[in-house]
Amino acid sequence: MTKFLKFKDKGDKYYILKLEGNGTTIYYNYKSGMPAQFDVLNLTLPEDYYCDFVTQENIAATKGREYRAKESLYWVSKRIENGMISYGMILEISVDEPNAGSGVTLTLENGAKIEKPKAPVKIDSVRVTPKYTAIIIFTANEVKLLEENRITNFRINNHEYTMYRTESANLKGIMGCLAKKN
C-alpha cells in the first residue's frame, strides 16, 4: 500500500511517501519545491504538488504577472501581460569545450523535437568550465507538448545533454501547473 501525506512545519510544506509491502514499511521525507530523488512509479501525486515549485511576481507597470520556477538546469516562466500570454525557458549547461553559436533542440519522450535554431546562446567562458545559457520562447503547441511529454535530452549549439528522469518529470509537472495559472 502506498500513501502520500502532506504537512506543514514552520510554514514550509513537506511530503512523506509511505510504502508498505511484504511486512516492510519505508518512508521518504522531503521538502516541497525540492525534486524527489527517486523515480515515481504508479503513484498519484497531489494535484498541486508541482505548483509548490512555482512563484508569482506582479508586474506593477502593466498590472501583469509572471509565474516562475527554477531548477538546476532551467528556469521556466509564464508571463501574462496586457492580455497576452507567453512562455519561456532559460536552459543552462556547463561543458569543457567553448563553442560559439546559437540554437537549441529539445527531444521529447514521444520522439517529437522542439527545434529553435535561432535561439540565442550566451557563453560565459570566463569560468573554468564554460557555461552556456540559451533563451527559448515557446508556442502554444510546444507548451502542450511539454505538458504531456518529458524531455529526454537537449542540445545547445553542438553540446548534447541527457536529462535525468527526475529533472524532466519535474519540468513536465511544472509546465502543467503553469498552464493552469491565470
Image (cartoon, rainbow, N blue to C red):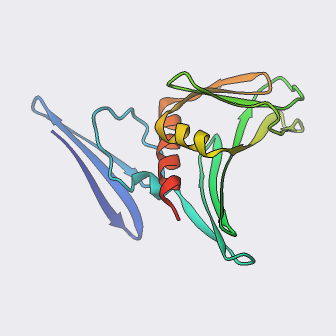
Horizontal relation, residue 1 to residue 180: left or right: left
Quadrant assignment for the N terminus? top left
Residue at the farthest left position: 23
Residue 60 x/y as whole percent: 71, 78
How many numbered marks, from 0 up? 0
Q: Identify which residue is drawn at 70% across, 40% down.
A: 91
Residue 104 x/y as whole percent: 74, 31
Q: Identify which residue is drawn at 48% across, 53% down.
A: 177
Q: Identify which residue is drawn at 9% across, 32% down.
A: 23
Horizontal relation, residue 154 to residue 149: left or right: right
Residue 178 x/y as whole percent: 53, 54
Horizontal relation, residue 82 to residue 19: left or right: right
Q: In this view, does 142 lie above or below 58?
A: above
Q: Identify which residue is drawn at 62% across, 43% down.
A: 72
Which picture quadrant has residue 105? top right
Nearest the viewer among 65 and 17 is 65
Nearest the viewer among 11 and 159 is 159
Residue 153 x/y as whole percent: 61, 25
Horizontal relation, residue 82 to residue 102: left or right: left
